[in-house]
C-alpha cells in the first residue's frame, strides 16, 4: 500500500515490530508481554498521528490510490446491480457509472462518478472528469428512477468536470445547469454521498439532494487547493494553506449547514479498512430511505428547495456601514 508522508513513522514502527517478532520466533529475544507493549505504543502513535492531521494531509488521504471508488461501493453494498449506459444524445461517458441496484432488498437508482483504480481504468474513466454526456446520462437515469418511484443515490468523486475544448463544444456548462434545474424538480428522494473529491461544478452537477453526506476525510469545494493557491497566491505550492483556508472538510461543512451527515472512516482513512466504510454507508443509505420515503412529493420538493436556499451567508455594504456607525 502506498504510504502517505504522515504515515512514514507508523510504517517504520510496524516494520520494527515485525522484525522483532521474526527474531523472537528463532531466538526468543522478546517476551510476549514486551511485544504487546510495543503494539500498544504503535496504537498510541497511530491515534496521535491521525488525530492531528492537517487539512492538506486529509486531502492526501482523500486522494489515496487505494481509497474505495464508486464501483467498489456499488459492488460491496449492493445485493445486485444492473448497469444502464448512454445519454441517448451523444455517447456513454465512462466517468459516470449508473444503474438499478438493490441494497438489503430495497431498490435504488445508483449513479456514481468513477475515477478508476489503475492506469488503464483511469484513462478509460477519464480520471473521473465528467463530460456533458455524463451529466445527461446521470439526469436520464435519475428521471427514470422518478418515473418508477425509486430513490436516487449519487456517489460524488471527481476533481471537476472535464475542462477540455470538446466538452465545451458539446455544452458542458449547459449540461450542468440543466441538471441543477431538473434535479430540484425530481419527484423522488435523492441521497448524495461525497466519497472522495467533490470539486467544483463537476460535483455540484450531480450533487442536488434531500440528504447530503460526506465520508470523514472527503472534501467538497468550489475549487481544488492547487487551483485556489495558483489564483490567490500565484503559487500552487501554497496548496496546504489553500486547503486550510477553503474550509472544505466535513466538520466545516456541517457547521455551515452545507451537508447533513458525516459518515465515519476507520483510523487513517477508508483505504485502511474499506469493509467498515461499506457497512457505514449501507446503514446510512437505508436509514435515509426510511426517513424520506414518508414525505409526500410536494413536501419533499419544498424541503429540497429550502435546504439549498438557506445555504451560505453574506454581508451587505449597508450592514457593514451600520455596524460601523456608533449610533446604529
Image: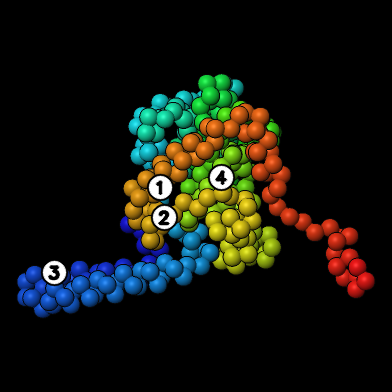
Q: CA distance from mark 1 to mark 3?
A: 36 Å
Q: Nearer the viewer, residue 41 or 157?
A: 41
Q: Which residue is mark 3?
A: 22
Q: CA distance from mark 4 to mark 2?
A: 17 Å
Q: Are marks 3 and 4 in contact (CB under 8 Å)?
A: no
The circle on residue 212 is: 4
242 up-or-down from 106: above or below: below
Q: Which residue is mark 1?
A: 280
The nearer-to-camera label among 2 and 3 is 2
Q: CA distance from mark 2 to mark 3?
A: 31 Å
Q: Secondary structure beneath disc 4?
A: strand
Q: Are marks 1 and 2 in contact (CB under 8 Å)?
A: yes
Q: Secondary structure beneath disc 1?
A: helix
Q: Of the residues under marks 1 and 2, which one precedes in the sequence?
A: 2
Give the quarter of the figure containing the N terminus. Answer: bottom left
The circle on residue 265 is: 2
216 up-or-down from 115: above or below: below
Image-based side of 188 in relation to 265, left or right = right
Q: Of the residues under marks 4 and 2, which one precedes in the sequence?
A: 4
Q: Of the residues under marks 1 and 3, which one precedes in the sequence?
A: 3
Q: Picture coordinates of residue 109 (x, y %)?
A: 48, 29
Amino acid at each position: 500500500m502506498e504510504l502517505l508522508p504522515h504515515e512514514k513513522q507508523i510504517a517504520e514502527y510496524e516494520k520494527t515490530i515485525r522484525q522483532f517478532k521474526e527474531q523472537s520466533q528463532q531466538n526468543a529475544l522478546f517476551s510476549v508481554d514486551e511485544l504487546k507493549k510495543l503494539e500498544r505504543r504503535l496504537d498510541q502513535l497511530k491515534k496521535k498521528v491521525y488525530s492531528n492531521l492537517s487539512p492538506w494531509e486529509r486531502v492526501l488521504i482523500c486522494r489515496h490510490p487505494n481509497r474505495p471508488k464508486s464501483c467498489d461501493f456499488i459492488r460491496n453494498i449492493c445485493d445486485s446491480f444492473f448497469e444502464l449506459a448512454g445519454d441517448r444524445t451523444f455517447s456513454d461517458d465512462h466517468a459516470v457509472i449508473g444503474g438499478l441496484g438493490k441494497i438489503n432488498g430495497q431498490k435504488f437508482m445508483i449513479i456514481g462518478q468513477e475515477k478508476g483504480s489503475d492506469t488503464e481504468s483511469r484513462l478509460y474513466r477519464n480520471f473521473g472528469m465528467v463530460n456533458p454526456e455524463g451529466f445527461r446520462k446521470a439526469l436520464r437515469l435519475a428521471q427514470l428512477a422518478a418515473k418508477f418511484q425509486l430513490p436516487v443515490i449519487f456517489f460524488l468523486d471527481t476533481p471537476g468536470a472535464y475542462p477540455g475544448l470538446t466538452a465545451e463544444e458539446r455544452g458542458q456548462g449547459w449540461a450542468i445547469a440543466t441538471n441543477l434545474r431538473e434535479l430540484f424538480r425530481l419527484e423522488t428522494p435523492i441521497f448524495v454521498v461525497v466519497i472522495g473529491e467533490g470539486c467544483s461544478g463537476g460535483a455540484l452537477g450531480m450533487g442536488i439532494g434531500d440528504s447530503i453526506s460526506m465520508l470523514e476525510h472527503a472534501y467538497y469545494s468550489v475549487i481544488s487547493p492547487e487551483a485556489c493557491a495558483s489564483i490567490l497566491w500565484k503559487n500552487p505550492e501554497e496548496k496546504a494553506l489553500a486547503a486550510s483556508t477553503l474550509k472544505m472538510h466535513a466538520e466545516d461543512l456541517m457547521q455551515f449547514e452545507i451537508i447533513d451527515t458525516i459518515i465515519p472512516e476507520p483510523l487513517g482513512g477508508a483505504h485502511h479498512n474499506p469493509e467498515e466504510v461499506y457497512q457505514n454507508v449501507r446503514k446510512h443509505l437505508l436509514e435515509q430511505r426510511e426517513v424520506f420515503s414518508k414525505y409526500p412529493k410536494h413536501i419533499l420538493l419544498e424541503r429540497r428547495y429550502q435546504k439549498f436556499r438557506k445555504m451560505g451567508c453574506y454581508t451587505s455594504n449597508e450592514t457593514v456601514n451600520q455596524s460601523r456607525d456608533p449610533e446604529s
